[in-house]
Image (spheres, rainbow, N blue to C red):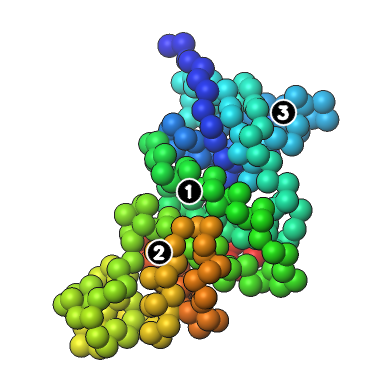
Amino acid sequence: MAGRTYKTEAVVLRSFRLGEADRVLHLYTLDRGRIGAVAKGVRRTKSRFGARLEPLSHVELMLHQGSGELQTVTGVELIQSHHAAREDSYRLKVGLNGLEAMLRLFTEQEGNARAFRALARFLELVDELPIEDDAGRAALDPLALSFQLKLLWLSGYLPHVTSCANCGAEEDLVGYSPRAGGAVCGVCRDETTLSLAPEGLGGIEALLRRPLAEAHEAGLSPRASRDALAVVNSSHEFHGGFRLRTLSA
């Protein structure tokens, strides 16, 4: 059966070598969600695709879908290279952290325009981040935390933090239970509950309320940032069975 060619916007989430000159790409596309594709000859010096298919790149692709699992890139137009993010270690780590979360949470070939637009906006804001000396703190950046929490929301795992997810109590919230899907009170906590400070719960709620562009205005304390990251990690582990590799890189 003959394949067909179509055009779509995409963000390159990951790439790795295939043979002597090709690359396999993991893409998140506007129309079809997560797909895999091969870019033939892209590693050759005279490749017409050049550096347009690096991770972080926002592109418009022509893709040919044949009978195999991998589609074939037949054309590329660059929308945004995100060169500013790629050239600074702090920004790059924030960006790669977000790309890995997309890769792990959105695995289906099913379009999700809201997730795609959130990813594109996130990468625009990564370009604008202040340059920091400590790339190890990138996972605690308010933009990184805000994006991670919004991805949990878009993938159906929104952490509920304004009242106890078990009994509805609004007082004495002491921790987070991924099994319950949110905060729990002192009465409902069990051995699996992740202890959180009140400022941590408040910080998560502040990040969820604000658009990505206002993440740095949430005024997170160091403890609130650590608590928000702990909630993201425990949600990933409970719902997806994974922990982001970029957090330990």
Which numbered disc covers residue 102?
none
Q: Residue at x 66, y 56 (%)?
A: 128
Work out how far the residue at label 3 is from the one at label 1, CA to CA, in angstroms: 26 Å
Check if mark 1's residue and mark 2's residue have beta carbons within 8 Å: no
- Of the numbered discs in the image, which one, if any, rests on residue 208? 2
Mark 2: which amino acid? Answer: Leu
- x and y percent of residue 93 in the render? 65, 60
Q: Residue furthest right?
A: 45
Residue 192 seen in render: no
Q: Residue at x 33, y 61 (%)?
A: 158
Quadrant housing the N terminus: top left
Q: Residues within 10 Å of mark 1 (few under 14, many from 20)?
A: some
Labelled disc at residue 49: 3
Q: Residues within 10 Å of mark 2 (few under 14, many from 20)?
A: many
- Sequence-first disc among 3 and 1: 3
Disc 1, SS: helix
